[in-house]
Amino acid sequence: MKISCARCGKPRELRNGHVNRAKKHGLNLYCGRKCAGLARRKNKTRQQKVLEKRTYDIEYRKKNQSELKKKKAHYHKKTYDPEVARKKRKKRAKAHAEYCRRPEYKKWKEEYDRKRRAKQYGPYADAYLIMVDLNKEIKSRSNKYEIHIQNKTFGKAQKRDLEAQGPKRSYYYTPSNS
């Protein structure tokens, strides 16, 4: 039986059984593999395909989160070797220590730790950071002696010296006799 290709329109001779089966199932008939393959293409750009795949993956992960977690845990349990991991850590330890000594890392880490500590105060994290900065500024402007007076942290010898001097310096910390 003679048919014309659904894609390019070229005539082609096919068996009656092929044509009848295609009509029955509502399928197109093509002149060859090349036209059949080209007809299946969606003609989408690479960016469109990447975007569709990304959205599909996001939805899939939301739906199957617990199942994926179990699979990952099982795979980790099956493949993880603590001795191999220890050797890798030991091999990288020197390079990691060197990396941690870099000034830009120290600066980043200091800021990171500061923000991490502030998170425990929730919505008051910003106020906590301002208070820490203020305390730092106050301490930078006062000497050790003034800080001890303010915090009332004297050693025994210092307390004895103050008690021997008498009440003329009432702004110093003295233990109460009551």
Image (spheres, rainbow, N blue to C red):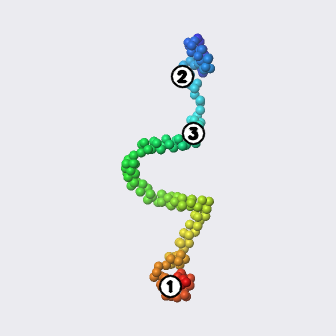
Residues at circles 1 and 3 in contact by the CB criterion of under 8 Å:
no
Q: Earlier in the sequence, mark 1 or mark 3?
A: 3
Tell me the amino acid under the disc marked 2.
Lys
Residue under the image location 60 percent in, 14 percent down? 20
**Residue beneath disc 1:** 162
Q: Is residue 146 visible?
A: no
Residue 157's x, y, as percent? 45, 82
Tell me the amino acid under the disc marked 1.
Leu
Residue under the image location 50 percent in, 88 percent down? 165
* Residue 102 falls in image quadrant: bottom left
Q: Earlier in the sequence, mark 1 or mark 2?
A: 2
Local SS, label 3 = helix
Residue 143's x, y, as percent? 51, 76
Identify the mark at residue 60; answer none if there is no mark: 3
Q: Residues within 10 Å of mark 1 (few under 14, many from 20)?
A: some
For the residue pair 173 and 126, the one nearer the viewer reads as 173
From the viewer's perspective, is residue 164 above or below residue 6? below
